[in-house]
Image: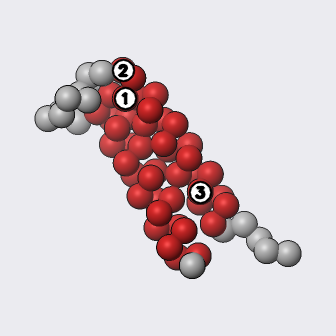
Amino acid sequence: MKLTKNLLALIVLAIGALWSLQGIGVVGGSFMTGQSQWLYIGLAAMLAGLAGLVWANRRQG
């Protein structure tokens, strides 16, 4: 279960990074390219992914 949570959090983190890069125009080929709102949506997704990693790896005690 821990592996599944970590993988899901990493996928959300990676998608957020992609959206952020598209938002600032580094990655092209999409309707999101150069649209600044995708930078913010991507940053929010990255924060959610980081929170998911913390949650998946917290100590049970």
Distance from disc 3 to disc 2, alpha carbons, whole Å, reads 25 Å
Element class at badge 3: helix
- The residue that disc 3 covers is 52
Alpha carbons under labels 1 and 3: distance apart: 20 Å
Amino acid tagged 3? Gly
Horizontal relation, residue 20 to residue 1: left or right: left
Q: Crowdedness of circle 2 by 10 Å Cα count: few (<14), some, many (20+)?
A: some
Q: Residues within 10 Å of mark 1 (few under 14, many from 20)?
A: many
How far apart are the alpha carbons under marks 1 and 2? 5 Å
Q: Position of residue 17 (x, y in %)?
A: 39, 43
Of callouts 3 and 2, the N-terminal one: 2
Q: Are marks 1 and 2 in contact (CB under 8 Å)?
A: yes
Nearer to me, 45 or 27: 45
Residue positioned 51% across, 59% down in the render: 9
Tell me residue 13's x, y (percent). 46, 51
Residue placed at 58% from the left, 76% from the top? Answer: 2
Q: Which residue is mark 2?
A: 36
Instruction: Tell me if 45 is positioned left or right of 28 in this view.
Output: right
The vertical placement of 18 against 54, above or below, is above
Q: Dot 3: few (<14), some (14–19), or many (≥20) neighbours within 10 Å?
A: many
Does residue 26 appear in this view? no
User: What is the secondary structure assignment of the residue under circle 2?
Assistant: helix
Q: Which residue is mark 1?
A: 38
Q: Quadrant of the C terminus?
A: bottom right
Q: Position of residue 25 (x, y in %)?
A: 26, 26
Q: Residue at x 77, y 71 (%)?
A: 59
Quadrant housing residue 11: bottom left
